[in-house]
Amino acid sequence: MSGWLALLPEFIMTAGLCAVLVADLFLPSERKSWLSPLALLFTALTLVALWSLKPGLAFGQAFMADGMGIYLKTIILLSLGIVIFSAWDFEKVWARPQGEYLFLMMSAALGMMFISSGTELVLLYVGLELATFPLVLLTAYRPADAKSAEGGLKYLMIAALGSAILLFGFSLIYAVTGVTQAVQLAAQVAKGGSPLVMAGMVCVVAGIGFKVALTPFHMWAPDAYEGAPTPVTAFLSVASKTAGFALALRLLAGAMPGLRPQWAQAMAILSALAMCLGNFAAIPQTNLKRLMAYSSIAQAGYIVMGLVAFDTIGLSSLLYYLAAYLFTNLGAFAVIMAVERFTGSSELSAYTGLAQRSPRLALGLLLALLSLAGIPPLAGFAAKFYLFAAAYGQGYGWLVIIGVLNSALSLYYYLRVIRVMYILPPEPNAPAIPKMPWALAVAMLICMAGILVLGAYPGPFVDMARAALVP
Amino acid sequence: MMTTVSFYLLSALAVVSALFLVTTRNLLHAVLALAVASLAVAGVMLTLNAEFLALVLILVYVGAVVVLGVFAVMLTGHFKKPTLPSSNELKIIAVVVSLALVTLLGGVILGQPAVTGLKEVSLDTVGKLLLTDYVLPFELVSIVLLAALVGSIVIARGKED
């Protein structure tokens, strides 16, 4: 029975999503505002359970609540909590049911939690489906809006293709090794990779590429990001990406360390492609959500460098980057949500003269974008610095050069947004931006604090990431 | 001998009906071809002694997916005339890519030494495994289904209320 204790956070999350669904059924419509606190309460309880947990195994070795799992789950749950905060009154803003929205967000988070701790192929696959399905449905959550329907459909098709390729890879690997558990798989693979295992590994790399939106598997991202309700986009860009890297860590680093030279080579090429395409394609964008989609493709390219380096420095920088990325991206999306709430648009033109219309929002977006570009002393700089150092240390100098050039390039389009906000005068008939609702302000403040603290004192957080890697 | 012959016959049927599925211009014919292809693949599984897989294929593909497809085609009224475009601009690229993939994977699989000593997996074993070693993913699937159900109802209800 002791193994079950390792699953306590997952059980609480399951109870939470059922509670939200049932409460939604019985609450009268004027009390629906109780749903967000309820979801937040269960998210907080899950976090407490997660942190008070001793690392442990459950179900043989299928589920491993180790340091890395706890670290990744913390990021996923924090992003769930911050997004719930920033879309406290989802129903009022988006005119779509709140209860099902919270339920779907929490089920996606549950799937991501299982990916973070899963060390067995079947469990990882089911977790991946649970993490993807609700997000597809949430992307198409406003079927009356053609963009939402289009984004949802594209996401569905391409996510299904990605799952199929991943599953095909699993079946090839299983056909040769006959095992599905990561530990046994690692031992089998170390004996010498047969060509069939190599083919399986290529499929697995492609499947991960779909999940984290690496070029050339990124096609779904811009449409899904633009079409989804903005809180969903925020969750998609942070939590879903974290889960994708969790999948990569469990499958490539955990189950196939013996094939590292091969998959590192493949991942290095995907990383270079994602950085170049993401940054170049972001330049002409005029919609901020679409711009963030391409920016997140490029960011995924940077993060993969940690996996390519594959030593303690590389993997801990990857984990640290995910934490920095959490606060930075959610901060940017909190501002996008606030502007969208009052102007009804996420086009760049809605941001003209934002510095005069709402200095706080403009400052928030300024910090987040500079952190994404990697300007010191913000979180993004420290994170990028460690990643580049790790990749260089493992002899991937060419990748670091591409990364540095791309960082410079990305500054161009981030600065373009900043120019629109700070240099251009506001249009005379621009909609006014009143005071922000308190919950959104709290979400934004948490993110800004995260960006500044992680950037100014990276030491303790890097140590935390390193400690998470000790099995 | 009998098994070998039926294996090749069923495989040929599966390939032919799959080709018909992607080339026909009538949506209803395509759905029916999917039924034939799934049945043929299920037959192939039976000749390989994988009863459980064959049953699941018939149950899920023929029983659920194809019926759903027929409903969708009938309800949207796309069965009267050929509605699919007659040509695909990417046809040549598609042929080249799939041939390359088949050659590559086929080469790898044929180069692999034959797997021997495989045990026949009975329904009994599958059931026991699902409720012992694989009980966690098995239970997790129920939440996947619940989420899919809730989400699709919300979207199908449609109107912004």
Image (cartoon, coloured by chain):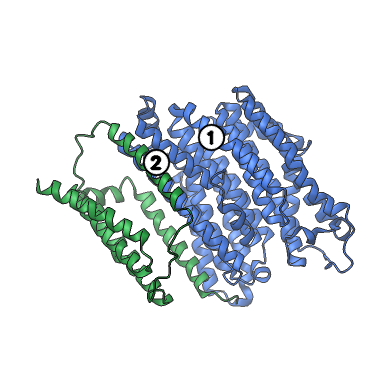
Chain colours: A blue, B green
Provide residue A223's location: percent of width, then percent of height: 60, 57
Q: What's under tag 1, amino acid-wise?
A: Met
Q: Are marks 1 and 2 in contact (CB under 8 Å)?
A: no
Q: Residues within 10 Å of mark 2 (few under 14, many from 20)?
A: few
Label 2: chain?
A: B
Q: Quadrant of residue B142?
A: bottom left
Secondary structure type for disc 2: helix
Question: What residue appears at the point 42 percent right and 61 percent down from the top-left corner?
Answer: B145
Q: Is A158 placed above or below A149 here?
A: above
Q: Which mark is residue A267?
A: 1
Labels 1 and 2 positioned on one and the same chain: no
Q: Residues within 10 Å of mark 1 (few under 14, many from 20)?
A: many
Q: Which residue is mark 2?
A: B100
Which is more toward the observer, A334 or B37? B37
Instruction: Give left or right: position of A53 versus B56.
Output: right
Q: CA distance from mark 1 to mark 2?
A: 22 Å
Instruction: Give left or right: position of B148 versus B109.
Output: right
Which is more toward the observer, A358 or A194? A194
Provide residue A196's location: percent of width, then percent of height: 35, 34
Residue A92 in view (yes/no)? yes
Secondary structure type for disc 1: helix
- Give the label, 1 or 2, closer to the camera: 2
Question: What residue appears at the point 44 percent right and 50 percent down from the top-left corner?
Answer: B92
Which is more toward the observer, B79 or A464? B79
Which is more toward the observer, A356 or B141? A356
Provide residue A199's location: percent of width, then percent of height: 39, 36
Q: What's under tag 2, amino acid-wise?
A: Ala
Where, quadrant-wise, is the N terminus of chain A in this rendering? Answer: top left
Residue A438 in view (yes/no)? no
Provide residue A90's location: percent of width, then percent of height: 65, 66
Label 1: chain?
A: A
